[in-house]
Amino acid sequence: MTQVDEPKLESDLGYRFGYVSKFIGFGADDVAAVHGAAPKLAPLVPALVDAVYDKLFQQDATWRHFLPRQHGYTGETPATLDKLTMDHPQIAFRKQHLGRYLAALVTKPYDGKMVEYLDMVGKMHTPKAGSKDLDVPLVQMNALMGFVADALTATILGLGLDRDTEVKTLRAFGKLLWIQNDLITRHYQAPTR
């Protein structure tokens, strides 16, 4: 039986990533499958980004979180939700971030720097990082992650991969997105005693 330092799971990001990765079986073969999908997925990233933003635009509960100034965005911000159109510069700015995130998933090594990046993805959707005005409820983050997981699954199934590669790629992305979800939800937890 493996001994787990439970308090360390909350205080040491690398330890947490290692534990969750090992628990769900995300390893070198999975990273290779994710990276192996890069050449076929890269040209599809803009369409994936558009699909995500089309979905976000459909609900006021998700779209309203794009009203506050996004960290790093220096342009004009819309005053009201009806002024926040899909072609607004702040949306273009956010789409670029999502595109870079998807590219990072399939190209970057899964080292300490990448783990910090994945953790920051969760943190930046709360007032704990970036904009103090940005506080996306966990239910919206979970809904988004579910949509992204399904969109990636549909995209991978459409790549025309041989069956073995397709299965390995689907499983690898499934594990990776569960790790990402853990690194999102941890920023919504009350501090441990």
Image (cartoon, rainbow, N blue to C red):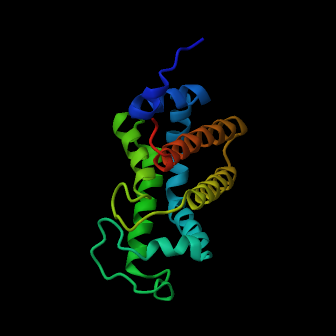
In the rendered image, the vertical position of residue 3 relative to residue 51, given as above or below: above
Q: Nearer the viewer, residue 152 or 145?
A: 145
Name the residue located 69 percent from the left edge and 50 percent from the top edge.
157
Give x and y (percent) for residue 98.
45, 60
Name the residue located 34 percent from the left edge and 56 percent from the top edge.
129
Is the N terminus in the top left, top right, bottom left or bottom right quadrant?
A: top right
Give x and y (percent) for residue 93.
38, 70
Name the residue located 51 percent from the left edge and 27 percent from the top edge.
19
In the rendered image, the vertical position of residue 4 relative to residue 11, given as above or below: above
Q: Is residue 163 left or right of residue 184?
A: right
In the rendered image, the vertical position of residue 170 relative to residue 4, given as above or below: below
Q: Is residue 83 left or right of residue 58?
A: left
Q: Nearer the viewer, residue 116 or 13?
A: 13
Name the residue located 35 percent from the left edge and 73 percent from the top edge.
69
In which quadrant of the rendered view does residue 147 lie?
bottom right
In the rendered image, the vertical position of residue 45 relative to residue 4, given as above or below: below
Q: Nearer the viewer, residue 193 or 46?
A: 193
Give x and y (percent) for residue 34.
53, 40
Q: Nearer the viewer, residue 79 or 38?
A: 79
Please identify the residue farthest to the right as the structure is shown.
163
Count of residue discs: 0
Is the C terminus in the top left, top right, bottom left or bottom right quadrant?
A: top left
Q: Is residue 32 left or right of residue 1?
A: left
Give x and y (percent) for residue 99.
45, 60
Please identify the residue farthest to the left as the structure is shown.
74
